[in-house]
Image (cartoon, rainbow, N blue to C red):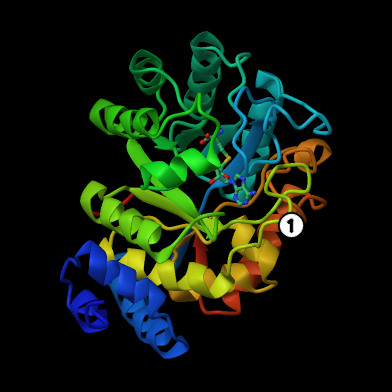
């Protein structure tokens, strides 16, 4: 094991895989505090006290995939399936625009209903009505041609968590028809086409180790994603991982600080999953170096159905209530929600 490399990281040096590993296995509250302080300095230099918000619209919980951790996997016969029409999606954007959102994130399972044609229609309608807004897609793996057509229709960003940068670990989280290589191919295609690209992973997913996390950090250091979504793994009762342990809020915050330091301009959400396992999780994430929140803009009638994990928060409130609640929470820690597209500043 190499020396605890906290100083090297804070001074801006790239760490070796072994050093990242010892940074993770050597976690302590004191180290977390030091790194959070450095992460906040770096965030402030680039973004000030602004926290960017993205309106998350969960367009469908139909999914052809069977990821072992996910509550909307196709084998979950208890999931109550729904999909939103173009009209419903636009209504969510109308509501969101009035509330000050300037980015809309369309997220969903891999649902064949949303062909390129259907999505192109939706993207063009949103961009036509709200040209000052960014459209982010989070709809899983598609072909190069499909990503290109959606980009040409006006989509600005794409979120596709890599889930883990360790191929063997990837294979333990996914059925054999899904491959690590294709996931990476998608991320590279998205970048090549010109999207702002987001990757990310769950903290504390089954079979994760300091070694696999070190690979995630190395991947982030090299890929330099525009966005990086990390949140704790939270078990879902109708999946094969129902009885696995949930991830830790402390380790999630530690990793948020490390990622901010590795790549200071990255847009880093403090996730709903973090808010689910800790009542002040989202505040803690922001104080560790995150600078994005993604409140739910989905119609209240479907929110409980987009259940990736158990006990998800904010499934009962109207969008306006969610936004007010977050606004108060951010004020309590000295931050302000920005009415802004919130593009990366690099
Ligand atoms: N189908 C899209 C969107 C997936 S949902 C795609 O493939 O990208 C967004 C993210 O939720 C996933 O990438 C995964 O990292 C996370 N997620 C899924 N199940 C989860 C669970 N049980 N606990 C925490 N996060 C989970």
Residue at the spot of label 1? 313
| Residue farthest toward the bottom in the current orientation of the protein | 30
In the rendered image, residue 35, in percent from the top left (x then y), is placed at 35, 80
If the picture is divided into quarters, which one holds ligand 1?
top right
Residue drawn at x 50%, y 22% is 123
| Label 1 packing within 10 angstroms: few (<14), some (14-19), many (20+) | some
| Vertical comparison of 28 with 17: above or below | below
From the viewer's perspective, tell me whether residue 118 is left or right of residue 188. Answer: right
**Closer to the camera, 317 or 310?**
310
Pick whichever, 51 or 235, lies toward us.
235
User: With 171 as the anchor, is 34 left or right in this view?
Assistant: left
Residue 211 in the image, given as x and y percentages of width and height: 36, 61
Q: Is residue 133 left or right of residue 95?
A: left
Q: Can you give x and y, in whole percent of width and height, for residue 56 in the image?
A: 60, 43
Residue 8, picture quadrant: bottom left
User: x, y (%) of residue 302?
Assistant: 79, 36
């Amino acid at each position: 094991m190499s020396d605890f490399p906290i100083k090297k990281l804070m001074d801006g040096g790239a760490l070796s895989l072994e050093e990242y590993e010892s940074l993770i296995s050597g976690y302590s509250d004191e180290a977390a505090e030091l790194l959070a302080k450095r992460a906040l300095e770096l965030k402030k230099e680039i973004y000030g006290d602004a926290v960017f918000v993205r309106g998350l619209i969960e367009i469908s919980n139909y999914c052809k995939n069977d990821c072992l951790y996910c509550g909307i996997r196709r084998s979950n016969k208890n999931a109550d399936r729904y999909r939103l029409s173009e009209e419903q999606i636009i209504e969510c954007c109308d509501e969101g625009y009035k509330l000050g959102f300037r980015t809309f994130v369309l997220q969903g399972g891999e649902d064949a209903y949303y062909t390129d044609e259907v999505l192109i229609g939706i993207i063009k309608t949103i961009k036509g009505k709200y040209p000052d807004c960014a459209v982010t897609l989070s709809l899983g793996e598609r072909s190069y041609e499909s990503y290109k057509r959606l980009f040409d229709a006006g989509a600005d960003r794409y979120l596709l968590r890599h889930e883990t940068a360790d191929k063997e670990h990837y294979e333990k989280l996914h059925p054999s028809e899904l491959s690590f290589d294709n996931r990476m191919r998608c991320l590279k295609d998205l970048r090549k086409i010109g999207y702002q690209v987001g990757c990310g992973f769950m903290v504390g997913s089954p079979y994760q180790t300091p070694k696999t996390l070190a690979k995630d950090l190395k991947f982030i250091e090299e890929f330099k994603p525009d966005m990086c979504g990390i949140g704790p793994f939270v078990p879902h009762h109708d999946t094969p991982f129902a009885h696995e342990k949930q991830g830790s809020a402390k380790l999630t915050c530690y990793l948020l600080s490390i990622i901010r330091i590795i790549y200071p301009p990255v847009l880093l959400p403090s996730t709903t999953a973090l808010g689910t396992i800790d009542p002040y999780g989202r505040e803690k994430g922001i104080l560790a170096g995150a600078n994005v929140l993604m409140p739910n803009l989905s119609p209240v009638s479907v929110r409980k159905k987009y259940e990736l994990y158990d006990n998800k928060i904010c499934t009962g409130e109207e969008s306006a209530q969610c936004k007010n609640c977050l606004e108060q929470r951010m004020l309590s820690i000295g931050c302000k929600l920005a009415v802004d597209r919130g593009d990366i500043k690099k």
